[in-house]
Every structure is written in structure tokens, then in C-alpha cells.
Amino acid sequence: MIDNNINVYRINAGSCNGCDVELLASILVPKFGFDTLHCTYTNTPEEANIVIVTGSITTRSKPFLEATLKRLPDEKVVVAMGICPITGGVFRDSYSIEGPLDRFVNVDVNIAGCPPSPQTIVDGLIKACALWKEKVSA
């Protein structure tokens, strides 16, 4: 049986926190409609249906990221949020950057921006929710 509630988990893999602040605004401000997606934020990766990764994937955060990704259920949707996990951002040529995220995991949805706007985040989450529903119904 498919639960209508979708659990969202966030991993900060070395971000400046700009994306994290915008994600928080997207979740807390009712006008952006996060609550209409039937999503809840979870602090437990094992409960996650959607994982959002922010940051450039630093050398220091990579082991934590990989260990956390292993704890996620098989049926998950991975979202790269912000330009940093998508390309490495302005830090991509730094000695301490291991990203982009798609080197370590299949990324299902990219939410571009530095940082992305709340509406862009919600639009990306709408895509992620639809993908997750497709995965569990297949």
C-alpha cells in the first residue's frame, strides 16, 4: 500500500547555507504550497522518500554523504538543489571539492539556482514527488 505522505530528508554536503535557508522558507511559508504536496520533513534517512542534497560535496563531507545515501530506501528520489551539487559551483576547481553529486549517486531532479527561489524549489519538489509516485507504482 502506498502512503500518501512523502518524507523529505536534507543533506548539507558543504553548502554556504543559502539553499538551506531558501528550502526552509519554501517549507514554512504557506504561499509556496509545500504543504499541498503532502510532504513532511524527516530527520531520519531511513524514512525518506526524497533526499535533497545541497553543497559542493567537500572532501570532508563526502564520507558522511556516502554513508547517509546507503541508509536511504531503495525507492527514493535524489534531488540536487543549487548549482553547487549540480556542477560544483564556484568552488568546482578547488582541491577540496569532490562533486558534483552525480559522481556518487543517480540524480533524479536538479533544482538550479544560487540559491534557487522558493517557487523553483517547490516546482522541483513537485517533479520529485511525481517521480517517487511513479517509482513505487511501477
Image (spheres, grey):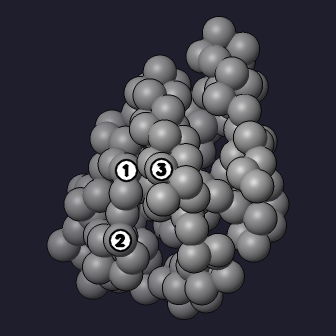
Judging by the rendered image, the residue that carries numbered circle 2 is 106
Q: Residue 80 occupies which quadrant of the picture?
A: bottom left
Amino acid of disc 2: Asn
Left-right relation of 40 to 52: right
Residue 79 image point, x, y percent: 45, 54
* Residue annotated with mark 3: 134
**Residue visible at 72% across and 51% down in the picture:** 2
Kindly identify the amino acid type of the residue bearing the numbered disc 3.
Answer: Glu
Is residue 72 visible in the rendered image? The answer is yes
**For marks 1 and 3 on the same chain, the one whose residue lies earlier in the sequence:** 1
The CA span between labels 2 and 3 is 16 Å
Mark 2, Cα crowd under 10 Å, few <14 / some 14-19 / many 20+, is few
Viewer-nearest residue: 123 or 98: 123
User: Which residue in the rendered view is the most extreme toward the left?
Assistant: 93
Pair 1/3: label in front: 3
Compare residues 90 and 52 and report the one nearer the observer. Answer: 52
Q: Is residue 98 left or right of residue 67?
A: left
Provide the secondary structure element on which disc 2 rests: loop
Q: Quadrant of residue 111?
A: top left
How much space separates mark 1 and mark 3, taking CA atoms?
14 Å
Determine whether the residue tagged by mark 3 lies in a helix, strand or loop. helix
Within 10 Å of disc 3 (Cα), the crowding (few <14, some 14-19, many 20+) is: few
- Residue at 50 percent across and 67 percent down: it is 14
Other residues around mark 1 within 10 Å, as few (<14) / some (14–19) / many (≥20) = some
**Residue named by callout 1:** 109
- At mark 1, the secondary structure is strand
Residue at 57% x, 58% y is 136
Residue 27 or residue 6, whichever sits in front: 6
Residue 100 point in image, percent of width and height = 29, 70
Indicate whether 38 appears above or below 13. above
Residue 114 vertical position relative to residue 11 in the rendered view, above or below? above
Q: Position of residue 96 (x, y in %)?
A: 35, 82
